[in-house]
Image: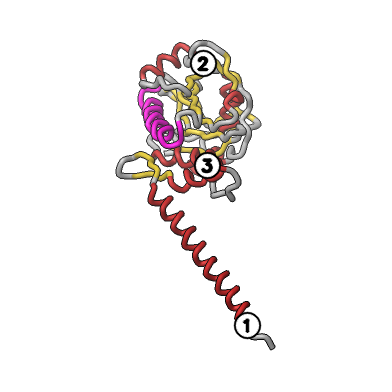
Amino acid sequence: MVFIASYAATCRAEPHDFTAFSRERALAYSQAALGRTVGAHRFLNHNGEAVELDRFHGRPLVVSLIYTSCYHTCPALTRNLAHAVDVAREALGEDSFRVVSIGFDSAVDTPARMNEYAREQGISVPGWDFLSGEEATIRELSEDLGFIFFPSPKGFDHLAQTTIIDTGGRVYRQVYGNTFETPQLVEPLKELLFGTAARLPVTVSDWIDNIRLFCTIYDPSTGRYRFDYSVLVSVVAGLLCLGMVMTFVVHAWRTRGRSKPVA
């Protein structure tokens, strides 16, 4: 589900103007943020210390906007995200990316409340920050991310959206739903870390990245990622076979050239 409850959108020129519209338009609004550079917005962590988003440049960043007085959907989204993050770190490395959960109900989601929310969800892992911000900052960030939220009788209706930001601070992928499948988060992170396709290896690091790109695969039976050595063996065997064929062709061509009769 893209939306929780009803649907609404904001106009970038008038961020406070909410109008009801279809799921398709909501998705289009969110997808339009892809490639957009996210501003260096300033937030406070659970200790009340200032944190600017551009400090996370250099590594992929996963951004989840929630509100702490939500009693069902936001906690479910956070717990599902926690599982996906655990799997991703196991596969890609503990320090390979960062995560921030940001409370968009600026009147309620104070640093103390965000800290309490993290404890309630059982999240105390390094590299995952729970942040608070002023209303204007939340609005600006929401526009950058293509995130939609608006007041409703039950609190807020909003997009169930997790955003992946690349190492340069640009929106790279949107993940929808409060119970998304783990590969929906891990595969984009894998692309950002190892590349979307094999590069011509120049350095040892390039070789390692290419191997990890091809051999780190998702196992549906366990719900985890693993390094599949059979893929590596297949690649090596294929390269050896190709080398043997090329050697045979070159040898045959040279032999034929030497045995050609002289007129």
Residue 33 shows in this picture:
yes
**Secondary element at image label 3:** helix
Question: CA–CA distance between discs 1 and 3?
Answer: 50 Å
**Residue located 38% across and 17% down the image:** 119
* Cα distance between the residues tagged 2 and 3: 30 Å
Confirm whether residue 22 shows in the render.
no
Q: Quadrant of the C terminus?
A: bottom right
Q: Secondary structure at mark 1?
A: loop
Mark found first going from the N terminus, 1 or 3? 3
**In the depicted view, which residue is nearer to us: 233 or 36?**
233
Residue 239, position as x, y percentages in the image:
49, 58
> Furthest-right residue in view?
263
Is 177 positioned to the left or the right of 255 in the image? left
- Kindly indicate the quadrant of the structure image that contains residue 35: top right
How far apart, in angstroms, are the residues tagged by discs 2 and 1? 79 Å
Query: In terms of sequence position, does the residue under pointer 2 or pointer 1 come before the other?
Result: 2
Q: Residue at label 3?
A: 194
| Neighbourhood count class around disc 3 (C-alpha, 10 Å): few under 14, some 14–19, many 20 upward | many
Q: Is residue 24 left or right of residue 116?
A: right
- Look at the image and tell me in which quarter the N terminus lies: top left
* Residue 85 x, y percent position in the rendering: 42, 31
Identify which amino acid the numbered label 1 is placed on.
Answer: Lys
Asked if residue 92 lies in the magenta stretch, the reply is yes
**Where residue 241 sits in the image (x, y, percent)?**
47, 62
Residue topped by disc 2: 45
Q: First in sequence, mark 2 or 3: give its number.
A: 2
- The residues colored magenta run 70-93
Amino acid type indicated by mark 2: Asn
